[in-house]
Image (cartoon, grey):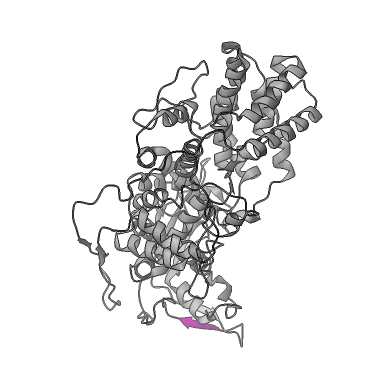
Amino acid sequence: MARVLNWRWSLVAAVTVAIALGGSAQAAPEKVRAKADGKKPEAAKAETKPKAAAPNLPPRPKKTITPPSLTAAEIDSLMDKYLASSKVPVASPTTDVEFVRRAHLDLTGRPPAPEQVVGFMRTKLPDKRAKLIEYLLNQPEYAENWAHYWRDVIQFHATNQNGNQVQYGEFEKWLAKQLEKNRPWDEVAREMITATGMTNEENGTALQVAHEAQAPELAGEISRVFMGIQIQCAQCHDHPTDSWKREQFHEFAAFFAGARVRQVGDGKGAQREFELVAQGRPQYKMPDKADPTKQIPVAPRFFLASDSKPLPAGLTAEERRHVAADYITSQDNPWFAKAFVNRVWYVLMGDGFNSPVDDMGPEREAKAPEVLDVIASQWAKGGYDIKWLFRTIMNTQTYQREIRSTYSASGKVPFAAVAPARLRADQILDSLSEAHGPAFGGGGGPAAATKKKGAVAADRKSAVPKTKGAQRNGNRGLFDNLFGIDPSTPYDDVLGTIPQALYLMNGAQINSAMKANPNTVLGQILMSTPDNRRALDMLYLRVLARDPTQKELKVLTGYIQKVGSRTEAFEDILWSLINSTEFITRR
């Protein structure tokens, strides 16, 4: 870049002031009352039988599926009652231009392409938001995005750092297929809890292998991930703040005894292969606190079931795991549904009923518990339909409110507004790929600025080349290391770092992609569009998925005149947009 850094800082400050003064570039949209139910299942009621239990095992209730009747409007009504006591006015509905970016990021993990933004804005259908939600739920990027989310949930807490054993890539592909088919969450969770087999094949073994199939590690993680309850603090002593006892932790851990990861073959090849096996009739023991040299035999028992009794002796390792999955995913265990609903709500709203999302439980006080209970109950009775949950929440007025700072009145009250949230590492990578096109990473970026059909998108002629959807390349590892965070971390605890800022400001890869030459997005915009106003519109759509405000236009046109060189001025403008808070924030 030809301009010195202090010019850019001045520009960032000027644009920031313009944004603050000018607000959104779009007027508030007409009120849309979107349908919340989506497609109803054909059968009014159906039953599925759980896996046949071994003799002498405790009977578990059958899974009964009743199509949920809860609507988005009913969720809003419950939320209005909760917010009434705060006497704080709720935030206004978000604009269409903000909604289209938010919906794309939340469901597909990627910003919309310019033609998708323009197409959505031009569409006049009253239910276009509901149609967009439905459209995105049926794109493969939705499954890929949420498979990556759950991969991160597991990987950030992994104790096994041997990537050849865990094979996260194969796990992510497997999970994406389950989500694309909309397989019920209880079935997905069951497979992750009970799976065995080769770790380099597409299956659900990653969670167990990530913790070396060690029973105590699995007990803590399975409880945290699938029930939002951190019982692992009771491993060595009674829980310091909750009522969980040390014996309860080890009784739960006993379900997962008897598994191990073993190497298959002679290991002489470049890629060693590993297998997760669960064999034999294990006997789990916990250390005697009075005498650590002694071990006390412990029978499996589920700590959340009031009527749970120790399982009979002699069960195989496989039988124990299936019984554990029965207890965890059963419709009579409310924490299984609450944990998933709370995670989805947290991502979509920027604030959860419980935060951190993996620290719930009967002794934690939730925000708007009546809303959480109703959604979780309906979702469980409906058979854990993941797409129904997304569809219903995203069609609420609660989800479609504007984002407010936590320093504002409505921002301080949970769910009176949507809370700001920093993008995940993969979302930042995809946003950079969309902004820069093939010039970023040699065209290997994952953004898919493809032509879309239907009521929520329209074609638009552009001189900017479209990038093809592709597997994340080497950039993926870089961004995971540099920008990656545990998805269970509260957003308020996620702060930018100096290495992150330096990468966005001075990274060789980004600086190369920002140059206005014939091979870059910026260069082709300037060559095809001599009008500065039009060029700024195209650049903003590409980077921020919106048009510049009048305040921003005034600042930027003045800056272009001041610099004198159109190329250098636009390079600096692109630099300032990439380094703005808005670029890495979900709005």
Question: How far from the left and from the top, in percent, is residue 379?
Answer: 34, 60
Q: Which residues are magenta?
A: 292-298
Question: How far from the left and from the top, in percent, is residue 202?
Answer: 40, 46
Q: Is residue 464 above or below residue 397?
A: above
The total number of labels drawn is: 0
The quadrant in which residue 239 appears is bottom right
Report the front residue among 65 and 478.
65
Question: How far from the left and from the top, in percent, is residue 565?
Answer: 74, 14
Regarding residue 262, the answer to whether it shows in the image is: no
Report the front residue among 204 and 581.
581
Question: How far from the left and from the top, in percent, is residue 574?
Answer: 66, 26
Q: Residue 97 magenta-drawn?
A: no
Report the front residue among 202 and 424.
424
Q: Is residue 231 above or below residue 13?
A: below
Q: Residue at x 48, y 74 (%)?
A: 362
Q: Residue at x 52, y 71 (%)?
A: 365
The quadrant in which residue 57 appears is bottom left
Report the front residue among 429 and 481.
429
Q: Residue at x 26, y 76 (%)?
A: 55
Quadrant where the N terminus lies? top right
Is residue 336 left or right of 152 when viewed as pictured?
Answer: left
Regarding residue 155, the answer to whether it shows in the image is: yes
Direction bottom: furthest residue: 290
